[in-house]
Each structure stands twice: as structure tokens, then as C-alpha cells.
Amino acid sequence: LYTLDKYYNKTEDSVRLLLESKELDVITIGTGKTIIDQYPVPNVATTKGSKVFLLTNSNLEDLIIPNFKGWSKKDVFTYLNLAKIKYKSTGMGYLTNQSIVNEKINPGDILEIEFEEKYVTEEKEE
């Protein structure tokens, strides 16, 4: 277990290196140099491989929407809420489809996302 510190006003580079050295999956939101928000919040214990979200001091209107395919609903919602992106979701489980990928979202647009259970068995074509 690793207990997160408060990373506000610290540089994204230094915090990323620290967290990656603890084998955490660091997800940076924005292109700024300084951290202005984080999830999980300070003093929360995380396990190896857990995602840690760092929101930087960049203009969120310039944010490129990443490919969330395979992410859990909780992780996708955490990212979108920190980035203040409006969304509409259907389903449960893990992300299988999204309306905007690897491009900017325009003000007023709503990201449409679909989730499915991870253990859905795919029918084989014969």
C-alpha cells in the first residue's frame, strides 16, 4: 500500500516520477506543469497498479479526449468529472464505445459513452 500525499501546486513531472516509482498508473489531465487537483484525495492508501489522476493547470478547452476503451466506469467518470466534461452513459462495467476519441470536445458537446460487462462471451463466427 502507498498513501498519497497532497500534490497541489507541485510539478506534474516530479509527482509523476514519484508515483510511477511506487508502481501506480498515473493519468495526467491537461498539459499544464502544475497540479491543481487529484484523485484519490490526499491520505488515501492505494495499491500497485491503481490509477492516480492528476489535473494540471492547463486550459481544459484544449483537452484531447483519450481513448477510454477497457477503462472501468469509475475511472472514466473520475477523469470526466475532474476535467469538467459533460457526458451521457449507458451500460455497466467497462468502456466499449465513446463518441469522441483523440480530439478536442467543443463547448456544449456531450461525450456519449457505452459500458458493457467485462465477461460478455463473444460469439465466434464460423
Image (cartoon, rainbow, N blue to C red):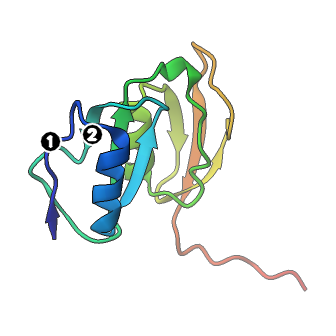
Q: How many marks?
A: 2
The crowd level at tag 2 (other Cα within 10 Å; few <14, some 14-19, many 20+) is many
- Residue of label 1: 6
Kindly identify the residue that appears in the image at 91 percent across and 86 percent down.
126
Of all residues, the one furthest to the bottom in this rendering is: 126
| Relative height, residue 70 to residue 107 (above, below) | below
Task: Compare residues 126 and 21 and report the one nearer the observer.
Answer: 21
Q: Helix, strand or loop at disc 2?
A: strand
Query: Does 65 sit left or right of 29 as displayed?
Result: right
Image location (x, y in percent) of residue 6: 14, 41
Per the rendering, the mark at residue 38 is: 2
Q: Helix, strand or loop at disc 1?
A: loop
Image location (x, y in percent) of residue 1: 16, 71
**Looking at the image, is mark 1 or mark 2 nearer the viewer?**
1
Of all residues, the one furthest to the top in this rendering is: 108
At label 2, the amino acid type is Gln
Cβ–Cβ under 8 Å for marks 1 and 2: yes
Query: Does 88 sit left or right of 80 as displayed?
Result: right
Image location (x, y in percent) of residue 88: 53, 33
Q: Earlier in the sequence, mark 1 or mark 2?
A: 1
Task: Compare residues 64 and 123 and report the one nearer the observer.
Answer: 64
Kindly identify the residue that appears in the image at 29 percent across and 71 percent down.
48
Kindly identify the residue that appears in the image at 42 percent across and 49 percent down.
27
Marks 1 and 2, how far apart in space?
Answer: 8 Å
Query: Does 16 sit left or right of 5 as displayed?
Result: right
Task: Compare residues 125 and 110 and report the one nearer the observer.
Answer: 110
Residue 12 picture quarter: top left
At label 1, the amino acid type is Lys
Of all residues, the one furthest to the right in this rendering is: 126
